[in-house]
Amino acid sequence: MSAANNSEIQRVALILLDQFSLIAYTSTIEPIRLANRVLGQEFYSWKTYSLDGQSVQASNGCTVSVDGGIADLDDADITLVCSGVDVERTPLPRELGTRLRKLNARGRTYGAVCTGAFVLARFNLLDGRRCTIHWENLRSFREEFPDIEVSGDLFAIDRNCITCAGGMAALDMMLRVIAIQHGAYLAHEVAEVALYQNMRSGESAQRHDLESRTGISNIKILDAIRIMDLHIEDPLSCQQLAMTVSLSPRQLERLFRRHFDCTPGQYYLKLRLETARDLLRRTNRAVLDVAIACGFASTSHFTKCYRERYSCTPTEERQSYFWAQGGRKTPRTAVPAQVVTAP
């Protein structure tokens, strides 16, 4: 991404998908609005678009009117796809990919906010690019697109492609865009007006550290949990786990019983089943594929463990989640949830 000529207005286009994140959307728009206000002139202009030109509902139920549909997208300097929940099953018209690829071919900046990286990936627009996505979608994204370099960073800027994890990370990303185009001084002025005191770099972590999330400070337990998370597909035995943190299996079990009232194996199984539940909800992968990805040798064993924890089978989980999301299906005429070969 290059600096802008101070005399040129930077045109920003936001494509809002159904159930988009409202906080991510406003965190994208407000920094450039404030940049105009701080300097008393229009450095940025923006327009919003939907797939069909109709108003779009955010994930919190608010409805946002737009300036047009995909057919109205012009040659904006920055075009961002803003999505939110259930993006993996959102039907996408091929025209969206065609227009985004044209913008890329012209050297325009394009990208995604929150879960929008899924959309770019489906249209092969992240090939050879570094990107990021909200941490809740990170594992399913890696499963769906194993060849794409995706990180857990707040935001990523790779040449003319910019992505962020959503939420307040959109504010950090846009402040960085402002700094690149108009200088760090303006970015800090905007942050100050927004009462945002600590501008974060793209490499900042999305989540709190494990100690804060668990409320536990014991280093051995924290190390064991990190190792479990790294070995979801190929689970370690309790003895292997204990060896990696320099404890005996008995010592490790005592620690887990004291802090979690369960054995290391039970805690490990919970992590694997939580991962499986996420993949069932966010991807279209077969139940057997999900089972293998979460370290289960057979569908029958996976189903047994899943039913014991969630009181339903993996298939029932997927069906119930589907209907809870309004029963939306991907039309045969739309782009399915997989990579589309560019023309």
Image (cartoon, grey):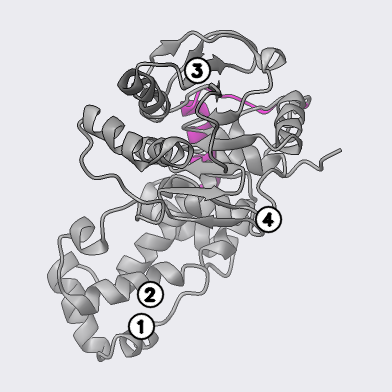
**Mark 2 or 4, nearer chain start:** 4
Q: Are marks 2 and 4 in contact (CB under 8 Å)?
A: no
Query: Residue at label 4?
Result: 128
Label 2 – label 3 distance at C-alpha: 47 Å
Whether 254 is drawn above or below 90: the answer is below
Q: Nearer the viewer, residue 131 or 331?
A: 131
Q: Which residue is mark 1?
A: 241
The stretch drawn in magenta includes residue 330: yes
Q: Earlier in the sequence, mark 2 or mark 3?
A: 3
Q: Amino acid at mark 4?
A: Gly
121 part of magenta stretch:
no
Spatial CA span between label 3 and label 4: 30 Å
SS at mark 4 in the image: loop
First in sequence, mark 3 or 4: give its number. Answer: 3
Disc 3 target residue: 45
- Amino acid type at image mark 1: Leu
Of callouts 2 and 1, the N-terminal one: 2
